[in-house]
Amino acid sequence: MLAGLIWCAANASAAAQTPATSAPAIPLRVLKVATGPSGSQSGGTFVLSEERSIFSPASDREVLAYFQWDGMPGPHKLVAQWRSPDGGLTSTSTIDYVATDRRFGAYWTLPLTASTPPGIWSVDATVDGQPAGRASFEVRAEKVESAPVKRPLTTSE
């Protein structure tokens, strides 16, 4: 099974097609690692529709694994490695990215089908060869109920 790759950043105009093969080692700080069933761009930042760690092909189309970092602006190589419940590497996705801000992020998707093995899955991210976070989640055969969607508080609240 191959995982799909989609990416975003805090500043969508930061995308570039130039490879980042020789980025220097940088101080990198993981700001966020989360999984959810879907998401969208909001104000230049990617937001998951809900954050959860249990999914099912009976109720979800895919799992999105979202990572956000604080690092040096410039070219970076972002890599995600998906591991199935048996620990085997199922796929690797690589993108070359040019960050215009210190804060940048990416998300990768794992499509869920009836043949997706149930159990604990994980995705390991690296930035320029440095460990940059791990997301773990469970895939179950039975349907999973979504949690109520939380909304932001209003100013008066």
Image (cartoon, helix red, strand yellow):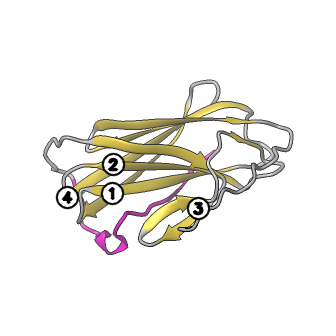
Residue type (three-letter) at the residue carrying disc 2? Trp
- Identify the element where label 4 is drawn: loop
**Residue linked to disc 3:** 152
Q: Do the residues labelled 1 and 2 touch (CB within 8 Å)?
A: yes
Q: Earlier in the sequence, mark 3 or mark 1?
A: 1
Residue furthest to the top: 86
Left or right: 129, with 27 as reference point: right
Q: Mark 1 points at which residue?
A: 104
Q: Can residue 2 be seen in this view?
A: no
**Amino acid on which disc 1 is placed:** Phe
Residue hosting label 4: 73
Left or right? Give the position of 126 relative to 115: left
Crowd around label 1: few <14 · some 14–19 · many ≥20 (10 Å): many
Query: x and y percent of residue 42 in the render?
Result: 50, 70
Q: What residue type is labelled 4?
A: Pro
CA gap, disc 3 and disc 1: 23 Å
Look at the image and tell me in which quarter the N terminus lies: top right
- Pointer 4 or 3: first along the chain: 4
- Helix, strand or loop for the magenta stretch, by majority: loop
Q: What stretch is highlighted in magenta?
A: 1-20
Q: How crowded is mark 2: few (under 14 residues within 10 Å), some or many (20 or more)?
A: many
Ranked by sequence position, the earlier of labels 4 and 1 is 4
Which residue is depicted at the point 25% across and 53% down? 76
Residue 69: mark in rendering: 2
Which amino acid lies under the numbered mark 3 shown in the image of this protein? Pro
Which residue lies most toward the bottom here?
13
